[in-house]
Amino acid sequence: MNTEKQIEFDKIKELWMGFAVTEKARERIAGVSFYLSERELRKQIKDTSDGKMLMERLGVPPLQGVDEVKDILTVAEKGGCLIPYQLERVEKALAAVRRLRDYLKKGKSFENPLAYYEENLDEMGEIREEIGRQIRGDRVDDYASGKLCQLRSQMIKCEEQMKQKAEQIMRSHRECMADSYCTLRNGRICVPVKKEFKLRISGSVIGKSSTGNTLFVEPSGVARLYEELELLKISEENEVYRILYTLTAMVGEAADRIRGNMEMIEKLDFILSKGKLSMEMDAREPAVNTERRILLRDARHPLMDKQINVPLQFEAGGSRRGIVITGPNTGGKTVTIKTVMLNCMMAQCGLHVTCGEADICMSNSYLCDIGDGQNLAENLSTFSAHIKNVLEVLSGISKDSLVIMDELGSGTDPAEGMGIAIAILEELRKSGAIFLVTTHYPEVKEYAKKTPDVMNARMTFDRETLKPTYQMVIGEAGESCAFYIADRLGMPKEMLKVAARAAYGQEASERYCFRGEALRNTGGGRISRIRQVKREELSEKYKRGDSVMVYPDKKIGIVCEPVNEKGVLRVQLPGKKIWINHKRVKLHVAAEKLYPEDYDFSVIFDTVENRKIRHDMERKYTQEVIRYE
């Protein structure tokens, strides 16, 4: 039994997590459950209210994710060297701490308790400014140190000298060059020399063109400057590492303070996410009690559109611990019991509730049985799953529980289901828990009417428009309104009278006044059946000598043998005889229109050899055999 999923609190959590910035806060939200400590619960609700008030006055707080920074601190503590990107992440996190401190300082003017968390944040301006001065654009800045600035200036100067030297050589040996500009090959500046002038240019061949006619030569003067540049690069790299290690050491020494800042951001993120959720749902702070009393005024389901949701008025506790809700299908019974439990659970998780006013008791468990629970994999029918959930509820119930059950006793024989429903209600009543159940059984309504601590309630329904009004009236039993709905939808009054008589007896059925007309039976469309053709009809249809068309090739042939018991006939086509189903043949010209009455068809169908043998057989004895194809 997953209560959170059945009452849709899991969807509230998903919405809530969307307002959190840090992964730690989202993990905490995913694992949130109702508080059992009154002191802790009151603190959590107050935090939600303070966070909401702070954001209503100052706007959205400048929070940011800090999960990456935690991994960076671990590297620094273990003695690794942080790269410029990681140092910039640290600097941005400390800048976020500074902005958050400024935000919270403004909140002190409203005497908001959350604003005093500012005193627990250490912006560490020295480290932030040092990183910001030396690291820019994911690299160590040129002015991070005097030595680095000097080395990079020398490197630029050396590169310029190399380029000038190469261009000078090209100008003085223009006739030897294959092109008018120098090029870079393997990181070295080269001049394009024609193959036949290779010995005219002093230097090393670095590469050649695809045709082999051009050689790329690094002049000797350029090579000396290149060696100087490489030495400068080594010195520059050493200086960069010195700066990075120095900054890493600063971060490592301050890791605990930075981590403390990150934890404070995560804590504030969790608190303020509750305030954001309250603002999104237009929720209110609930009052909390431990006296088993629930009062909801203008309550609504938090996931439903506020513009179309009808506010619910609900009260339970004291002598009204059990409420049996009846009324028509789609009348809002299930939404009502979900709304009550969902608001109660949200309040006990430290959240605001979607009510105009709420006084909610603390419960030690939230138990429910909603939906048919049918499970084909576990071979559970609707009723079996229902009973399994009910037994699980009853085994975990106590006087401090809140229980909701939908369609009590449904899914089986009505008489037996009614008995089971009353037995379940009696167990719920004995437990002392607050419970809400929905049902359609008249006997259950009578039980609630006569039993102490249990009360009927009904969902109202507009019989004229056939629409539920979603209003609950406590103290009155409701009707299913099935007859009225069926009548308005066109069920014949004779059928409805039979239904009312079967349900409530002859005397009660006479009180109903139905207006439905008799059914107009259109009977549906006409079935087109395949006509079974007899063999006698086919043999009459196709005779020997008939000219027929063979499909799908549309070739003309002559019937050799009529249709057999399998519906197949033999047809003579040009150069061959074939067996074919009668459905693929259509009569073209009948035989009597083509041949005389006593015509000898052996002229058409027999070979010359067979006709000669048949002629001999008619005159004398012969051992010859007539062969058919």
Image: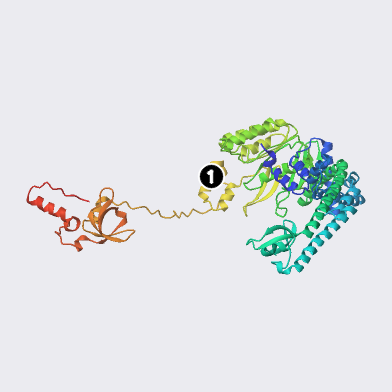
Q: Residue at x 67, y 59 (%)?
A: 208
In the rendered image, residue 550, in percent from the top left (x then y), is placed at 30, 58
Q: Residue at x 10, y 50 (%)?
A: 617
Q: Looking at the image, which is closer to me, 28 or 95? A: 95
In the rendered image, residue 98, in percent from the top left (x then y), is placed at 88, 50
Quadrant for the N terminus, please.
top right
In the rendered image, residue 427, in percent from the top left (x then y), is placed at 68, 31
Identify the residue under disc 1. Answer: 499
Report which quarter residue 389 is drawn in. top right
Q: Looking at the image, which is closer to me, 246 or 272? A: 246
Q: Residue at x 51, y 54 (%)?
A: 517
**Number of numbered discs overlaid on the protein picture:** 1
Q: Is residue 53 visible?
A: no
> Left of 457 or right of it: where is 573?
left
Q: Is residue 180 visible?
A: yes
Q: Residue at x 80, y 64 (%)?
A: 164
In the rendered image, residue 254, in percent from the top left (x then y), is placed at 88, 43
Report which quarter residue 120 is drawn in. top right
